[in-house]
Image: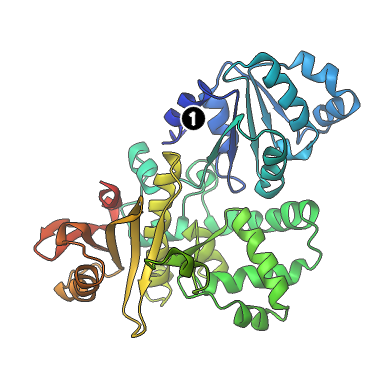
Amino acid sequence: MIEREMAAKLLELAGQYPIVSITGPRQSGKSTLAKSSFPGYEYLSFENPDIRSSFEDDPVTFLRRHDSHVIFDEAQRVPELFSYLQGIVDESNQPGQFVITGSQNFLLMKSVSQSLAGRVALFTLLPLSQFELVESGKMSSDLQEWLFRGGYPRLYDSVRDPQDFFGDYVQTYLERDVRAELGVRNLAGFRDFLQLCALRCGELLNVSSLAADCGISPTTAREWLSILQASHIVFLLRPYFSNLTKRLVKSPKLYFYDTGLAAYLMGIESADDLYKDESMGQLFECAVIAEVSKRLYACKKTPRLSFWRDDHKQEIDLLIERGRNIARAVECKSSATYRSRYFETLNRIAEERLGLNAAQQAVVYGGEECLSTRMGELVAWAEMGRLLS
């Protein structure tokens, strides 16, 4: 089993809150993390119809039998549970009573916010980060293979072929989450929408264009995009402005949390395809930004990330913010060969417009050597952890 970076913080806050909640995309390892972090807890999954029926028939008796040190998996399946848990934890006021997990984040968080506000520590578990793979000894030494495979744990355990895994994953996601849980009926249209989002990975989001290409209304496109965000399939990177309100009206960029899923949806069938596919640059940029997000979520920090783009289309791929200040400006280059010109635009914008010195500027590239230069830090793709140091 691959150890998750989040485990230490999860245990820490379980000693402070009566309930901890783990959400994230399906198959990201939530149940495994919960069971390994709390080995003495009883594990109950509401995916099991007998357990679900037992609760629905008599919730009071059910919770008398399972009133402490319990992991409730797929808790969104029984939304009434949360009101009962509120009464139990308010009466006992004991930390670490319950762990709740769920794959349908929209429904789970809706129930949590209605009944358990202030009583629960919230965690978001994403697919495996590069850091976790390196620490476990399962990180590929080949950049293209890592991008193609992505970070879903099962691909490093029992399933060897990403094409098999992602084919089943997409079908399960569509059938169980999108149709059964959220009531989307046009599954064929939604799948087309999902593929179009993958093809636009790393691009400025134009909802009207996306809707037109999919044959749906802009309103429906926004609703479906919200579903993908709530499912932690995609995320939006906002442009940076010193006036924070402007971030809400300028176009964000669209990314996937997992490059393996994005590559599958793009129609890439092998790691070798990436050597000659123009999407290599898109997926590399996606991987860098997603890695930073995963590491911050693992420490229970909300990622404060953005990008820079001016009227002349000069661009910095990633700005990492701390508080109200920019800590790091990052450019992403998938080439394995370093060129000094990679720093030119970064240096000009970061110094003149953002007031950042060379030590705060970095280029992540597809090569193997890390260097500290007078223009900034050159970071090898396998050493992305340096971006948060």
| Closer to us: 386 or 302 | 302
Q: Secondary structure at mark 1?
A: helix
Number of numbered discs on residues: 1
Residue extending farthest left: 374
Callout 1, which amino acid? Leu
User: To which residue does mark 1 refer?
Assistant: 10
Q: Position of residue 308 (x, y in %)?
A: 35, 71
What crowding class fits label 1: few (fewer than 14 Cα within 10 Å), some (14-19), or many (20 or more)? many
Name the residue located 47 percent from the left edge and 50 percent from the top edge: 151
Residue extending farthest right: 57
Q: Position of residue 139 (x, y in %)?
A: 36, 47
| Closer to us: 231 or 287 | 231
Name the residue located 68 percent from the left edge and 29 percent from the top edge: 72
Q: Image check: 58 left or right of 211?
A: right
The correct choice, above or below, for 226 with respect to 97 in the image is below
Q: Image check: 74 left or right of 151?
A: right
Name the residue located 45 percent from the left edge and 70 percent from the top edge: 202
Q: Position of residue 82 (x, y in %)?
A: 74, 32
Q: Picture quarter containing residue 92?
A: top right
Residue extending farthest bottom: 312
Q: Picture quarter containing residue 357?
A: bottom left
| Residue 249 visible in the picture | yes
| Closer to us: 354 or 367 | 354
Name the residue located 41 percent from the left edge and 77 percent from the top edge: 278
Q: Position of residue 110 (x, y in %)?
A: 70, 45
The correct choice, above or below, for 21 with respect to 211 in the image is above
